[in-house]
Image (cartoon, grey):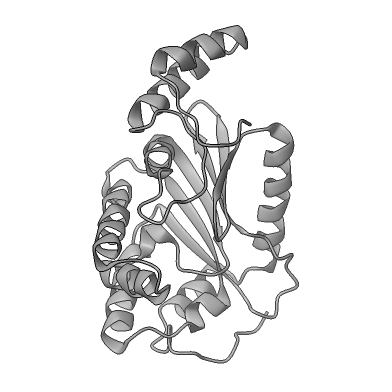
C-alpha cells in the first residue's frame, strides 16, 4: 500500500496495473474507482470535513453482493437516521454546522443501496454498549422506528455482541464481496480508514467474524434487544 496524499489519473492507474501484471477485470475495477474520486485514487487520513474515502465506500457498497460489518462504538452508518447522525457529529464538538449537515446528507445518500431491489445481503455485528448510548428522546424514538423498518428487510441481519462476551477488542471493520468473488476489508480508526485486500489481512478479519458470530446473541434475541423501548437509554447488559 502507498501511504500519503497522492493522486493519479485513470490512465496512470491503468499503466501501473499493467506493469504489475494485474488481470483485465482488476484493471477495469480499479480504473473505475479512480475515476469516481475528485482526487483520483488516493489514500489519506480523514480530513475535518466529509472524508475523501466517500467515493471508495460508495463504490464498494454499490458493487457488493454481501457486506459483513462490525461496529463496536456506534450504530452502523448505513442504519442511522439523519437526526441520529447529526446528533453524534455535533457531539464531537469539532465540526461546523455546515459540515454536520453535509456529513449527514452524505450518509443518507449512501443508504440508497439498502432500498434497491437488488442490494447486498448485510450482516451487522453491533456491540451491545452501542445500544446503551443515550440519544435525545425524539431522536431515539425515530431511530428505533427506522430500525424496526430495516429489520423487516430480508437482506439485513443483525447480531448483538453482549457487553460481557469475551471478544477481542477489534476496531470497526466491514468485509465487502462482489459477484466476482473479490473481497475487500475497510478498517476504521478514530483518525483514519484503511482499505485492505491482501489475503493475509482478509484471513485475519475472517477469523474475527467467526469469533463475533460465536459470541453474538441469536437472531431473534438480537432483534428484540435492538428494538427494545429502552434502546439508546442506558440499560443493564444483556446476558451472554
Up-down relation of residue 106 to residue 238 (above or below)? above
- Residue 86 x/y as whole percent: 31, 70
Above or below for 21 versus 56: above
- Point out residue 131 in the picture as x, y percentages from the top left corner: 48, 79
Report the side of 122 relative to 136 (left or right): right
20 relative position to 31: left or right: right
Q: What residue sits 70% from the left and 54% below the top?
A: 208
Asked if 166 appears above or below 205 in the picture, the reply is: below
The C terminus appears in which quarter of the rendering? bottom right
Residue at horizontal 54 percent and vertical 54 percent from the top: 69
Quadrant, the N terminus: top right
Q: How many marks?
A: 0
Which corner quadrant of the image does residue 154 belong to? bottom left
Instruction: Measuring from the top left, give residue 209's x and y in whole percent.
Output: 66, 54
Estimate the x, y position of residue 81 in percent, counting from the top left.
29, 67
Picture quadrant of residue 212: bottom right
135 and 191: which is toward the camera: 191
- The residue positioned 55% from the left and 61% from the top of the image is 190
Residue visible at 33% across and 33% down? Answer: 38
Amino acid at each position: 500500500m502507498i501511504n500519503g496524499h497522492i493522486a493519479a489519473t485513470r490512465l496512470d492507474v491503468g499503466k501501473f496495473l499493467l506493469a504489475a501484471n494485474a488481470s483485465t477485470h482488476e484493471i477495469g475495477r480499479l480504473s473505475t474507482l479512480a475515476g469516481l474520486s475528485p482526487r483520483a485514487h488516493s489514500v489519506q487520513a480523514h480530513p475535518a470535513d466529509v472524508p475523501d474515502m466517500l467515493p471508495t465506500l460508495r463504490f464498494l457498497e454499490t458493487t457488493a453482493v454481501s457486506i459483513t460489518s462490525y461496529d463496536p462504538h456506534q450504530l452502523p452508518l448505513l442504519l442511522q437516521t439523519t437526526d441520529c447522525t447529526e446528533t453524534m457529529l455535533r457531539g464531537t464538538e469539532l465540526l461546523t454546522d455546515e459540515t454536520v449537515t453535509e456529513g449527514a446528507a452524505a450518509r443518507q445518500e449512501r443508504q440508497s443501496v439498502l432500498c434497491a431491489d437488488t442490494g447486498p445481503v448485510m450482516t451487522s455485528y453491533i456491540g451491545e454498549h452501542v445500544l446503551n448510548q443515550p440519544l435525545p428522546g425524539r431522536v431515539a424514538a425515530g431511530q428505533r422506528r427506522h430500525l424496526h423498518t430495516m429489520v423487516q428487510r430480508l437482506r439485513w441481519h443483525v447480531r448483538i455482541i453482549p457487553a460481557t462476551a469475551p471478544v477481542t477488542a477489534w476496531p470497526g471493520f466491514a468485509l465487502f464481496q462482489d459477484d466476482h468473488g473479490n473481497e475487500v476489508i475497510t478498517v476504521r480508526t478514530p483518525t483514519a480508514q484503511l482499505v485492505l485486500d491482501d489475503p493475509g489481512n482478509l484471513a485475519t478479519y475472517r477469523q474475527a467474524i467467526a469469533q463475533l458470530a460465536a459470541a453474538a446473541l441469536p437472531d431473534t434475541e438480537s432483534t428484540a434487544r435492538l428494538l427494545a423501548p429502552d434502546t439508546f437509554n442506558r440499560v443493564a447488559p444483556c446476558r451472554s
